Amino acid sequence: MKKNFKKLVKILNNGGIAVMPTDTIHGIVCRAQDRKTVEKIYSLKKRNPTKATIILIDSLDRLKLFGIQPTNEILETLSHYWPGPVSIILDCHDEAYSYLHRGTNSLAFRLPYDKTLQELIKSTGPLVAPSANIEGMSPAKNNEEAYKYFGDSIDIYVDGPSAEKASKIIKISKDGLEVIRP
């Protein structure tokens, strides 16, 4: 990712879509605050339109962009899991982000451990990062597999290794912690 860093930042900041390794598996990514491009990812993936997606952030402060003000107790829980390969679902009732929460009134965030990925997010803002695959099919393990799904519809394919398993997903609610995906 370091080799194409400036090009990647420019593409994402101009409304582009990338397939790239994340801190877990390969993802299809765009800026989370670019509604039009988020919708394009949903279309490319043939993703269920009522299913929210994971958003990568580079710091806890980024939660404020989505109208989320975590309590001290929630911040303590987040600091236990982050940075790391754990996506955490938090309540988000802001209708301005309905294109992200898809009526669920919650968003899943992950603060990756990888410093280069954090730098990318600092340069672009939070990134929507669902797995690089058509819904219901196996996640792409590399760019060749991702290309079979998306072809030339992607603005840039970024080389690099990724982990072999998706993030753990935990939901934080008033009832406590619930593991959604181990």
Image (tube, rainbow, N blue to C red):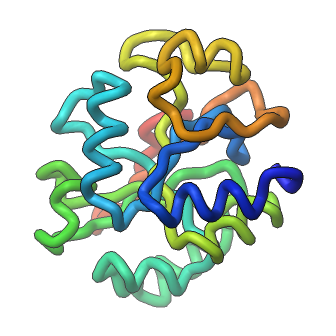
Q: State the image coordinates of residue 109 (x, y, percent, origin top left).
A: 48, 60
Give whichever of 41, 169 is nearer the camera: 41
Towards the viewer: 90 or 28:
28
Quadrant including the C terminus: top right
Q: Residue at x 86, y 55 (%)?
A: 2
Question: In the figure, is residue 59 to the left or right of 55?
Answer: right
* Number of on-image labels: 0
Instruction: Locate residue 142 relative to residue 13 in the image: left or right.
Output: right
Q: Nearer the viewer, residue 3 or 83?
A: 3
Q: Give x and y (percent) for residue 92.
A: 25, 69
Single out the residue that lies furthest toward the right: 3
The answer to which quarter of the image holds residue 111 is bottom right
> Residue at the spot x=38%, y=13% of the render?
136
Q: Is residue 133 above or below residue 158?
A: above
Residue 128 horizontal/vertical position (percent): 45, 52
Q: Residue at x 51, y 46 (%)?
A: 29
* 19 to 62, vertically: above or below: above
Residue 161 seen in the current view: yes
Q: At which x and y percent is residue 52?
A: 29, 45
Q: Quadrant of residue 83?
A: bottom right
**Residue 113 can be seen in this image:** no
Residue found 37% across the figure and 81% down from its top: 65
